[in-house]
Amino acid sequence: MERIAIEKLIEWKNGKDRQPLILKGSRQVGKTWLLKEFGRNAFKDVYYANFEQTDMSGVFDGELSPPRIIEYLSALHGRKIIPHETLLIFDEIQELPRALTSLKYFAEEAPEYAICCAGSHLGIALHEGTSFPVGKVDVMELFPMSFEEFLLAEGLGALVNLVKAQPESVNAPAVAEKLSDRLRHYFVIGGMPKAVSKWIETRDHSAVQKIQNSILDNYADDFSKHVPRSIQTKVSYIWESLPTQLARENRKFLYGLVRTGARAREYESALLWLRDMGFVRPTYRIDKPKIPLKAYADLKSFKLFALDIGLLSKLSGLSPGVVASGNTMFSEFKGSLTEQYVFGELMKSDVVQDIHYWTSNGTAEVDFVISSNGEVIPVEVKSEKNLKAKSLQVYRKSFAPKISVRASMAGFRVDDGLVNIPLYALFNFGNCLRQASQAR
């Protein structure tokens, strides 16, 4: 399968001021596969070590001198590790804190060696007292596969290229039908690489669900193995409450829906653990859409989204049979899955720097407010073709944004700074914004 992150890794490889790279991401999003594929295609040789499976402490217990470490690794590799030609992959690096510390010395004394490390949010958050080499590493985050990557896995690269070159091409009935059909499948399959691979292999949703069940079981194992006992049950309660939280009309997270009588102070640490693991993503309310958005965030009011729409669909009990129901499935769970999908696409977009949502005294709410290239852009989500968006009208009247976005099942169009992007064309978000900007 094709991962767009490969292009970023190649940019890193060719960078003038390259430092050791840490690839962050939740478990099973494909970090190991990506780094091995990158090494296979971009380097003459690859040395791979998994610190969770192999005891590498002897290499890093002594002096953290790059020449000494390289000598040890060359011996283990069975051949010389050559600068610029050999990619060193340290997997699950968080399991060996001194290896993490050694990256500082490679950055300062031996930048000619190409080092990529994989580490989960969970692991890096676990080791208290670990000396993280701040400023001495490049950091990149890997997410589940986007809808664009799903389309590429489906062999629809030509269609993706057409939409990127001509945003209005999605208005052609044949293109819209093809993309909306694929999006229906993506809602229940999601972007976890194993699930997508199983779908491409079998075209069997029941087989995909078995993979999703396995992933969810593995996450439950992570809860039991890594989360402090005092909050294990609370972590599970929050995780299992996600479908209920997002099914609410305004999606705001309520602790009372986790357990009757639950309070923030009792569950806050459990929520932070889930966030640090990367299993959930909060987006906070703002009342003033100004840069920087974080400065105006209300940390007590937030929506909580899942790592992957396919896993959320499985948690929600959504039957794959709804795929056959046509575009009405996009309004399932009161549009919660649609909002989850839009959040995921925005999160993975290169042109989006920050994501919040806006409310005004409970009378109006815009689903997302993002910062992009120094501008604040409201994004309204509509799960069907109905384009009436009263809250967005209130926002535009109050703040007069240069560009506003409505994501819906209607076609692509730009009208007086308001751009409607079809849900199935959100992978073209950046190009649509540029076209809207040029049309002003």
Image (spheres, rainbow, N blue to C red):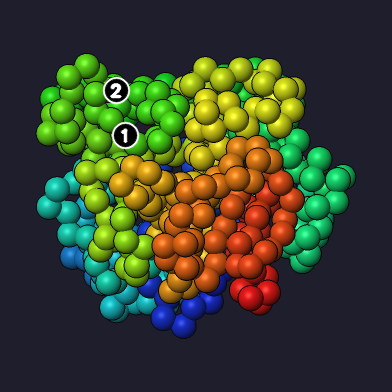
Q: Is residue 268 above or below residue 173?
A: above
* Rendered location of residue 434, percent (x, y): 63, 71
Q: Which residue is mark 2?
A: 257
- Secondary structure beneath dot 1 equals loop
What residue did someone put label 1 on? 253
Quarter location, residue 305: top left
Q: Is residue 181 above or below residue 220?
A: below
The residue positioned 65% from the left and 55% from the top of the image is 420
Q: Is residue 189 above or below residue 37?
A: above
Report the side of 89 relative to 5 (left or right). left
Specify few, some or many for label 2: CA neighbours under 10 Å numbering under 14, 14-19, or 20 or more: some
Q: Position of residue 375 (x, y in %)?
A: 45, 71
Which residue type does callout 1 highlight?
A: Phe
Residue that appears at 40% across and 35% down: 251
Q: Look at the image and tell me whether residue 36 can be seen.
A: no
> Where, quadrant-wise, is the C terminus in this rendering?
bottom right
Residue lying furthest bottom: 16
- Can residue 234 be seen? yes
Q: Amino acid at mark 2?
A: Leu
Which secondary structure lies at badge 2?
helix
Q: CA distance from mark 1 to mark 2?
A: 8 Å
5, 186: nearer the viewer:
186
**Depth check, front residue: 9 or 90:** 9
- Please tell me in which quadrant of the rendered image residue 185 appears: top right
Q: Are marks 1 and 2 in contact (CB under 8 Å)?
A: yes
Residue 374 x/y as whole percent: 43, 74
Residue 134 badge? none
**Which residue is painted at 58% across and 42% down in the image?**
382
Q: Residues within 10 Å of mark 1 (few under 14, many from 20)?
A: many
Query: Percent position (x, y) of residue 265?
Result: 12, 34
